[in-house]
Image (cartoon, rainbow, N blue to C red):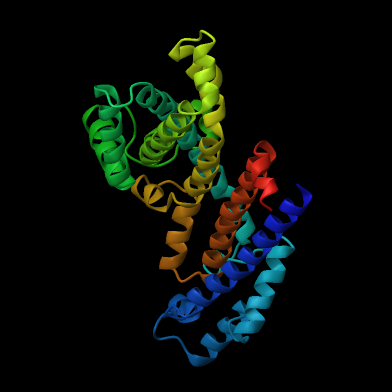
């Protein structure tokens, strides 16, 4: 197990190093100069040079990359060009929106997917199975921003049960904050629930064909009892892996949904920073989200190996 963990940790470090190089290179080659954007087209050359020096843009690209990486390793994400505040403080404020949103969406996705997948597997080839799989196919095919717009039209404009956008803030109370995140969480959860339900069904069907399931039936258990006592437990390993991967996606992939609902989360922060050419914010927040995705994958791999000895044996 230790050897497997070390190999996965080495893979994590290499992935982060490559990701940091790619992020920095892509943002650096993007057109436009942050200093020129901040001062306008009619700025004096001396003023422009002074601002570039203040922002550290007069350094070479290798120097800027090295300073950025060493600063992040020490917990210093830099200072925003636009707001002149530490990026770490901006991330901390926005994380209190993006993290609860991701957890809320993951909970809804799981609550929808588990019953749907189990129901479809228990009725394989029947009308119930076909209906559930048809619904999940639509869920996979339709983008989440379409769901977001339909939810706004129905529940915010027509029924007026929720607001069309914005975030009430946790200082207004827990339920006020959760109410503000409900429609965005549903829009994020529906496509993920469709994927998870299909994985749940497929995993259960694989387990139901195993010898130990036939042995359980031969000992007198009904199909329902064998499914709940033995089948579901053994089918959970790949399902839990997908849940872990979905959490990292929901945390890092809510940019469009946060834009639709005007949520002050990390995704909207990235979008605003791109518009303002605030490169240090874009680089640091993107790297932080990449780290979250890679670290969750690392944790899922370790958890998978802990419960499945076959995986450790292959390493």
Q: Residue at x 51, y 78 (%)?
A: 28
Q: Quadrant of residue 168?
A: top left
Above or below, 164 against 159 in this view is below
Whole-percent x, y for residue 99 in the image: 54, 42
Q: Quadrant of residue 307?
A: top right
Whole-percent x, y for residue 255 in the image: 42, 53
Residue with the most extreme right position: 2
Near-viewer residue (223 or 242)? 223
Q: Residue at x 45, y 86 (%)?
A: 43
Residue with the most extreme bottom position: 45
Q: Quadrant of residue 125?
A: top left
In-image side of 112 versus 249 (left or right): left
Above or below, 219 against 148 in this view is above
Q: Residue at x 23, y 37 (%)?
A: 153
Whole-percent x, y for residue 228 in the image: 51, 17
Is residue 240 among the parts visible in the rendering? yes
Near-viewer residue (298 or 123)? 123
Q: What is the total number of numbered labels drawn onto the structure image?
A: 0
Whole-percent x, y for residue 223 in the image: 44, 14
Is residue 160 among the parts visible in the rendering? no
In-image side of 245 versus 159 (left or right): right
């Amino acid at each position: 197990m230790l050897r497997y963990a070390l190999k996965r940790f080495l893979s994590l470090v290499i992935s982060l190093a490559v990701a940091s190089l790619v992020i920095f290179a892509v943002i650096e080659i993007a057109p436009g100069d942050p200093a020129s954007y901040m001062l306008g087209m009619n700025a004096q050359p001396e003023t422009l040079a002074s601002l570039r020096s203040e922002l550290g843009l007069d350094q070479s690209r290798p120097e800027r990359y090295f300073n950025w990486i060493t600063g992040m390793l020490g917990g210093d994400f830099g200072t925003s060009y636009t707001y002149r505040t530490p990026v770490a403080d901006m991330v901390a404020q926005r994380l209190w929106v993006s993290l609860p949103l991701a957890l809320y969406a993951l909970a809804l996705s799981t609550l929808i997917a588990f019953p749907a997948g189990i129901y479809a597997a228990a009725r394989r080839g029947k009308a119930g199975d076909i209906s559930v799989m048809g619904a999940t196919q639509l869920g996979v095919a339709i983008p989440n921003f379409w769901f977001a717009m339909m939810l706004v039209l129905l529940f915010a404009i027509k029924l007026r049960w929720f607001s069309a956008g914005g975030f009430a803030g946790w200082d207004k109370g827990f339920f006020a904050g959760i109410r503000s995140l409900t429609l965005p969480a549903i829009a994020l959860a529906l496509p993920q629930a469709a994927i998870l339900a299909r994985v749940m069904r497929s995993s259960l069907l694989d387990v139901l064909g195993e010898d130990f399931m036939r042995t359980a039936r031969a000992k007198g258990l009904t199909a329902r009892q064998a499914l709940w006592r033995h089948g579901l437990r053994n089918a959970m390993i790949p399902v839990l892996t997908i849940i872990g991967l979905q959490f990292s996606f929901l945390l890092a992939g809510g940019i469009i949904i946060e834009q639709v609902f005007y949520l002050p989360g990390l995704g909207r922060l990235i979008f605003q920073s791109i518009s303002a050419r605030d490169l240090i914010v874009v680089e640091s927040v993107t790297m932080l989200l990449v780290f979250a995705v890679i670290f969750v994958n690392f944790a899922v791999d370790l958890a998978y190996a802990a419960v499945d000895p076959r995986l450790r044996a292959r390493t």
